[in-house]
Image: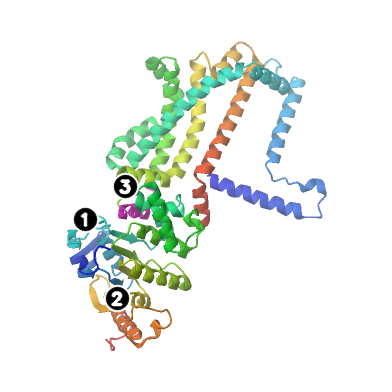
């Protein structure tokens, strides 16, 4: 939340290759990307294009083969403070032995400057923010998938991060729950002045949520197109998705992905 | 393990409900053959058979007294304070050794699971020491530690270390990498990572090891007391046998059976409380 403008995360000349079964695979091939403070950037691409790997490297959870990531001018070598990561697999990321409240407090307890009562009140505030008041004493596995992912979001936001990195966070829930989570995320992003980097394979989700969509090519992943989304800030699941501008963005990005998959020749773009 | 037992219980209740709802059966057969009561009744039948066999002197009555006389002897020994007087020092040795062993096993298991150096250093010696039956190194222990409590506590601790160590090690190795990554993104490292994530995540494994070790501790306690002691339940049993107090001897064995049963029950009670999340979590995922 420290700043609203300027580049908070910068990726420079990033390459990543893996060695599996004696063969080297290039996952990411020369990525340059700057994330502006306060923006909502979606990274889309075909499965296996390395978009999750890119996010993990930005989070300091994986290291690049070459190239650098900078967070607020500091080179990222481990998880940087002020950046939190929300995993796709909420059932595995939430701690099943901790109640909702204690899960949300997990990051806060590590800061060391907050008193017990401060932690508890912040945790309850965050639980309220994701509309789970009344479930503080539940265990994550007693909740539905959508509720669990809300717990994970509350846990991430409790530390008041500047940047939220999300790896396909809504891909494991049903369509209706997903729409609800999208609304929640949009409103939290606006209220809390967050910067969000959101990995998804869903073009619609990317366009609907974001201020910018970056599409990667098939592996080895490189940036195919980088599209600023200039839709009205107040978005609506039905009205926004019917706007001509929305449909145009969608068609352009889909055409890019399809072309990359060899499904259809690029005409529109 | 406990999880399967739970579901066994559940299905047993299900079938009993099924039998009970079958109206065509006569009322007496209604209460189910599938509850634990049947097992308790079976023990009762065996005891009656014992009583009959002893009354008819099928085995020499000298070494095979009636169960009723054993139970009444047991009761007298309990009331007179003689048996409690033997059990208390035994329990003290057992728990002292057990807790030392568990603490060591958990610590070493964590070290080996976390730091490859410690795994490489300790794995071979673990595999060499672990298969030695405890009675085999008892004489060595007597040689170095004498016949007092230190020796017995050491013996018990030594034997209980291994099950806890091996299970803790497997538990640490099987912590979900996503949980570890989650902790990393929140800047949780080192000791905090161990207490907040690694230990709770591997606690189901640790408890399995602790349960095995509890049985081992009881065994080693009795053995060490039989070989070298002037008090304790193991000593009591052996000296009763040598003094031809056969009923006392059986009463001692009966005490051990009761003790083992109570210890296991207590352990399950604690385990069910501590690992309640684990049963809920695994049930929800399956």
Is residue B198 covered in magenta?
Answer: no
Q: Which mark is residue A77?
A: 1
Q: CA distance from mark 3 to mark 1?
A: 22 Å
Q: Is residue B179 above or below residue A240?
A: above
- Report if residue A23 is visible in the image: no
Query: Magenta stretch mostly in which secondary structure?
Result: helix
SS under mark 2: loop
Q: Which segment is the magenta one?
A: B173-186
Dot 3 corresponds to which residue?
A112
Is residue B184 covered in magenta?
Answer: yes
Q: Which mark is residue A211?
A: 2
Pointer 3 local density, CA inside 10 Å: few below 14, some 14–19, many at least 20: few
x and y, in percent, of residue A165 in the image:
31, 64
Q: Residue at x 43, y 51 (%)?
A: A102
Q: Nearer the viewer, mark 3 or mark 1?
A: 3
Q: Which chain does the residue under circle 3 lie in?
A: A
Of B91 and A106, nearer the camera is A106
Q: Residue at x 23, y 74 (%)?
A: A223
């Amino acid at each position: 939340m420290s700043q609203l403008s300027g580049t908070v995360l910068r990726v420079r000349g990033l390459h990543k290759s893996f060695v599996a079964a004696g063969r080297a695979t290039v996952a990411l091939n020369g990525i340059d990307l700057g994330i502006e403070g306060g923006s909502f950037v979606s990274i889309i691409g075909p499965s296996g294009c390395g978009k999750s790997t890119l996010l993990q490297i930005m989070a300091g959870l994986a290291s690049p083969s070459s190239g650098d990531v900078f967070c607020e001018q500091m080179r990222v070598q481990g998880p940087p403070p002020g950046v939190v990561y929300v995993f796709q697999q909420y059932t595995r990321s939430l701690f099943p032995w901790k109640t909702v409240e204690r899960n949300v407090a997990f990051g806060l307890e590590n800061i060391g400057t907050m008193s017990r009562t401060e932690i508890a009140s912040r945790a309850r505030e965050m639980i309220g923010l994701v509309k789970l008041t009344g479930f503080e004493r539940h265990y994550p596995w007693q909740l539905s998938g959508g509720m669990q992912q809300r717990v994970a979001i509350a846990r991430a936001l409790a530390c008041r991060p500047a940047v939220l990195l999300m790896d396909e966070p809504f891909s494991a829930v049903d369509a209706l729950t997903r729409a609800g989570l999208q609304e929640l995320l949009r409103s939290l992003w606006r209220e809390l002045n967050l910067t969000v980097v959101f990995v998804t394979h869903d073009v619609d989700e990317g366009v609907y949520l974001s201020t910018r969509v970056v599409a990667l090519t098939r592996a080895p992943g490189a940036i195919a197109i980088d599209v600023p989304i200039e839709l009205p800030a107040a978005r609506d699941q039905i009205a926004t998705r019917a706007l001509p501008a929305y449909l145009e963005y969608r068609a352009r990005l889909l055409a890019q992905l399809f072309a990359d998959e060899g499904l259809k020749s690029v005409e529109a773009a | 393990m406990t999880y399967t037992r739970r579901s066994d219980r559940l299905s047993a209740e299900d079938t009993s409900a099924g039998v009970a709802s079958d109206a065509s059966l006569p009322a007496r057969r209604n209460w189910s053959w599938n509850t634990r009561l049947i097992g308790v009744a079976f023990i009762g039948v065996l005891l009656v058979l014992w009583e009959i066999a002893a009354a008819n002197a099928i085995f020499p009555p000298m070494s095979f007294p009636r169960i009723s006389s054993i139970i009444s002897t047991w009761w007298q020994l309990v009331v007179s304070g003689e048996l409690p007087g033997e059990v208390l020092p035994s329990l003290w040795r057992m728990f002292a050794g057990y807790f030392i062993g568990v603490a060591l096993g958990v610590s070493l298991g964590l070290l080996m699971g976390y730091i490859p150096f410690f795994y490489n250093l300790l794995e071979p010696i673990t595999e060499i020491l672990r298969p030695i039956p405890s009675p085999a190194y008892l004489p060595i222990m007597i040689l170095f530690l004498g016949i007092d409590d230190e020796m017995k506590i050491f013996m018990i601790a030594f034997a209980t270390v291994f099950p806890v160590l091996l299970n803790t090690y497997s538990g640490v190795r099987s912590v979900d990498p996503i949980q570890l990554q989650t902790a990393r993104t929140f800047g949780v490292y080192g000791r905090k990572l161990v207490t907040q994530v690694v230990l709770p995540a591997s606690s189901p494994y640790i408890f399995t090891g602790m349960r095995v070790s509890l049985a081992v501790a009881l065994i080693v306690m009795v053995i060490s007391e039989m070989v070298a002691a002037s008090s304790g339940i193991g000593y009591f049993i052996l000296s009763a046998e040598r003094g031809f107090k056969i009923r006392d001897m059986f009463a001692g064995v009966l005490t051990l059976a009761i003790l083992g049963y109570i210890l296991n029950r207590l352990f399950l009670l604690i385990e069910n409380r501590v690992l309640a999340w684990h049963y809920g979590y695994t049930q929800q995922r399956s």
